[in-house]
Every structure is written in structure tokens, then in C-alpha cells.
Image (spheres, helix red, strand yellow):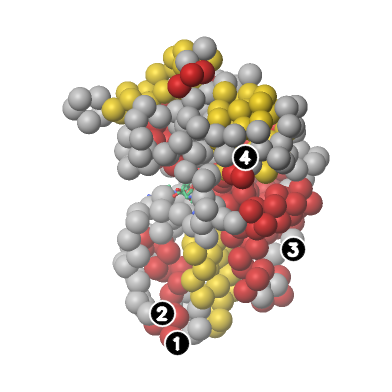
Amino acid sequence: MFRGLLLNKTEDGRTDARITEIDEADLPEGDVTVRVAWSTLNYKDALAITGKGPVVRRWPMVPGIDFAGVVETSSHPDYAPGDKVVLNGWGVGEGHWGGLAEKARVKGDWLVPLQAPFSPRDAMAIGTAGYTAMLCVLALERHGLTPDQGDVLVTGAAGGVGSVTVALLAKRGFRVVAMSGRAEETDYLKGLGAAEVITREGYDQPGRPLAKERWAGAVDVVGGHVLANVCAAMKYRGAVAACGLAGGMDLPATVAPFILRGVALLGVDSVMCPRPERLEAWKRLASDLPAETLAALTREIALEDTISAAPKFLSGEIRGRVIVPIA
Ligand code: NDP
């Protein structure tokens, strides 16, 4: 038996979340069994635990889209007992049991080796949120964005993806403008490297098809009116990396920014992202994310507290990254 967070669907359709003993015989199929050392909470985990979004596709479910730990048994050629590994995405914590438990069994193809110099704790402080932030930065760089082109906007900046994005872009020499609904996080965001912090004013309501050209690049975690207004305020041939829906799934925009200013909307998905790009992202995180910055944006909570912490993601109250020691 091992300890973990288990989600069940109740008869009236609610999600029942509880810490419980789980039978190792019930672990799903996979060729690598991992003793989980650290996991984390992301926005998607919060949707799963609260039942507020259709994240869980099989019941019962161990949530947790991320984990870092040590291989216990393996029949996969790339992994042997004792290897330190990291998992992000691949539907783990959604359709396959995830990281918020002492053990996980997955396909070895989904794992990546722990990237030096990170510890398992560091890897979870980064987590899917931080690795997605890196994918967004890589997408903007592939588009050709360089610091001399002008300001780069990061929305939802005080959250997990936003915080890491601010730090990564600042480290690369970009002038980063952080958009946050929380004025009280201004010092925190400047500490991560933001040159300026702005409110959502003028962005979270319906706007014009085209606005004054302001941003050379942008990373958006919010969607909805915010993303539409960001697109409208991009400079000629600017690019927006869009990865989130914290403010809504819809996109009430016009094609004007795309056809009149050549703006590029770059979709970023971390879940099914091919392995070479994952490895590239982890390598870049190792060189671009200083340990003290990572420490500044990370908070630790116990497994028992994950159930009460989850709703705070959905109300936009979480600062930076939340990690969970497991064993
Ligand atoms: P967090 O909850 O940590 O951060 C989200 C932030 O968005 C909040 O802190 C808040 O920032 C802002 N926000 C929240 N609600 C609203 C709102 N109604 N209107 C405008 N802004 C809002 O979540 P994560 O950083 O973990 O994830 C962010 C988003 O990215 C989520 O939608 C998540 O699903 C998505 N995501 C997508 C991935 C992918 O593969 N595409 C991978 C990882 C995450 P502030 O208070 O500073 O404004």
C-alpha cells in the first residue's frame, strides 16, 4: 500500500478528493514504476481536484500532471532502478494515474532524465508551468523575437507560468512588462525581473480590432478578452505565444491584427510536446533560471493541504509555484 490523493466521482456528479492508502496492485499499466519524491500543483490539477473543469477522464484518478522521483523498477531500455526522472503531461493525472501519490507507474517513453543541476525539488518548482513558460519563450525566439524589438508582455504574471516567463525573458535581456490583476504583487514581479507592472485595465473588456502598437512579443496565459486585446496591441509582425485559459476559453477577436499587421499567434501545448523539444526546454531552463529566482517564486505545501489549496488557483490567488513533498 502507498499514500496518495485519490479522486472519485460521487453519484451526484461531484468530485470527492481524499488522501488515502492505495493498493500497489491498482497502479495502471506501464514499464517504469517510480517512487515519487516531489510533485506540484498546476492550474489543471486544481481543475481536476475541485471538479471545476473536465480534466479527469477516468475514475478513480490520482491527480498530478507532474512528478519527480527515483525509478524503482523498469523494463524500459532507457531506465534502471535508481535513475532520477521527471514527468510532465502526456495525460498523466487526467487519463492515467498521476504524481500526487508515493508511487506512479507510467510509460518510460513519457519520462525525461532529471536535468542537471536540478534536484527533484527544483524540477517540480519548475513543473509543467515552468516548462510551458520555456516552450513559450522558445516559440517567440523561433519566430525571431529579439530584445531590441521592444517590450514583451506577460499576462497572468503572478501565477505559475507567468512568474517563470517573466524571469526567463528578463534573464535573456528582454524588457518585460508584467500584467497582473494584483497590484500587491508589484514588488514580487519586479524582483523576478519585470521592468514595469501594469493592471488588466483596458484588456479584460471588449476592445477595438486594432489598438496602438505596443508589444513586440507577448506570452498569454489568460485567453478571452485579454488575449484578443493583446493581439490588437501587437507591433507590426509581433508574435503572441498563447498557452492558457485562466480568464476564459473563448477568443473574441477579429482577424485584423493578423492580416493588417502580420501578427503571429503561436499556440503552445506542453502535454503532447515531442521529446526533443522537451529536452531542449529543460536544458534551457538549466541555463536560464537562476536558483535564487526559482526559490523566490516557490512555496511548499503538504499533500494534505492540496485539497484546500486547489480552489485558490481558480480564484487567481496563487503566487508563483506550489510544490508538494511526497516522500
Ligand atoms: P496560475 O493559477 O498559477 O496562474 C494563472 C494567473 O492568471 C493568475 O495568477 C492570475 O494572474 C491570472 N488570472 C486568473 N484568473 C484570471 C482572470 N479571470 N482574468 C485574467 N487573469 C486571470 O495557473 P498556471 O500558471 O499554472 O496556468 C496558467 C494557465 O496556463 C492555465 O489556464 C493553465 O491551464 C494553462 N497552462 C497551459 C499549458 C499548456 O500546455 N498549454 C501548460 C500549463 C498551464 P494575476 O493575478 O497576476 O493577473
Considering depth in this image, is 42 or 215 the residue closer to the camera?
Answer: 42
Identify the residue under disc 1: 260
Q: Which kind of residue does numbered mark 4 sit on?
A: Gly
Identify the residue under disc 4: 108
Of mark 3 and mark 2, the one earlier in the sequence is 3
Q: CA separation, marks 2 and 1?
A: 9 Å
Q: Is residue 118 left or right of residue 211?
A: right
Identify the residue under disc 3: 173
Give coordinates of residue 86: x percent, y percent. 65, 38
Image position of 165 with respect to 40: above or below:
below
Of mark 2 and mark 4, the one earlier in the sequence is 4
Q: Is there a contact, CB below 8 Å, between mark 4 and mark 3?
A: no
Give coordinates of residue 81: x percent, y percent. 73, 27
Report if the beta carbon of the residue with label 3 is closer than 8 angstroms to ligand 1.
no
Give coordinates of residue 239: x percent, y percent. 55, 72
Labels in figure, total: 4
Image quadrant in which you'd find residue 124: top right
Residue at the spot 47% in from the left edge and 15% down from the top edge = 23
Q: CA separation, marks 1 and 3?
A: 29 Å
Q: Is residue 113 left or right of residue 44?
A: right
Identify the residue under disc 2: 210
Label 4 residue SS: helix
Image position of 138 with respect to 23: above or below:
below
Q: CA separation, marks 4 and 3?
A: 37 Å
Give coordinates of residue 82: x percent, y percent. 75, 27
Image position of 317 with respect to 218: above or below:
above
- Circle 2 Cα neighbour tier, 10 Å, few/some/many (<14 / 14–19 / ≥20): many
Of mark 4 and mark 3, the one earlier in the sequence is 4
Image quadrant in which you'd find residue 323: top right
**Looking at the image, is mark 1 or mark 3 nearer the viewer?**
1
Residue at the spot 45% in from the left edge and 49% down from the top edge = 181
